[in-house]
Image (cartoon, grey):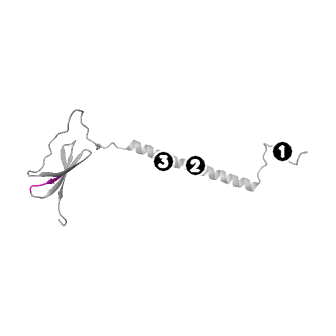
Amino acid sequence: MAGPDASLEPDEEKPLDPATERVRRKLVRFMVINLGILLAAVMAVVLALVYKSVSEKPAEREISAVPTVPSGEMISGTIPLPAGARIISHSAAGDRLTLLVALADESQAIYLYDIPARQIIGRFSVTGEGH
């Protein structure tokens, strides 16, 4: 015995009532708009990354962690200091050398030496408080 809906095929769907159809259309429109905004945002991020990678200027001279030296050779050079000066301490970082120097007049100074350029690039006087 067949029921009242036996004449409808199982693949056929009943049409939605007009109120439900309006809600479905609004939801589809909302979904399409939001997916468009999301796609635009993703494209903006990708374009920003591509722009940044293409427009980066190469550094004039990159500071290496360790100065490069041909194998079997040694770095050597002369660091000019004032007469009567003596080195109290030193520190090396990358291709820079920092020297704390006691000067002849009993004051102290910090010298910053660039190893690849082979020159002093900075001098800082060490003074007491209030000077």
Residue bounds of the magenta highlight: 100-104
Counting residues from the start of the chain, the first of labels 1 and 2 encountered is 1
SS assignment at label 3:
helix
SS assignment at label 2:
helix
Indicate the quadrant containing the N terminus: top left, top right, bottom left or bottom right. top right
Q: Position of residue 131 (x, y in %)?
A: 17, 65
**Other-residue count near label 2 (Cα within 10 Å), few / some / many at <14 / 14–19 / ≥20:** few
Residue 36 numbered tag: 2
**Other-residue count near label 3 (Cα within 10 Å), few / some / many at <14 / 14–19 / ≥20:** few
Q: Which residue is mark 3?
A: 45
Indicate the amino acid at tag 1.
Answer: Leu
Q: Position of residue 65 (x, y in %)?
A: 29, 43
SS assignment at label 1:
loop
Indicate the amino acid at tag 3.
Answer: Val
Q: Position of residue 35 (x, y in %)?
A: 59, 49
Disc nearest the viewer among 2 and 3: 3
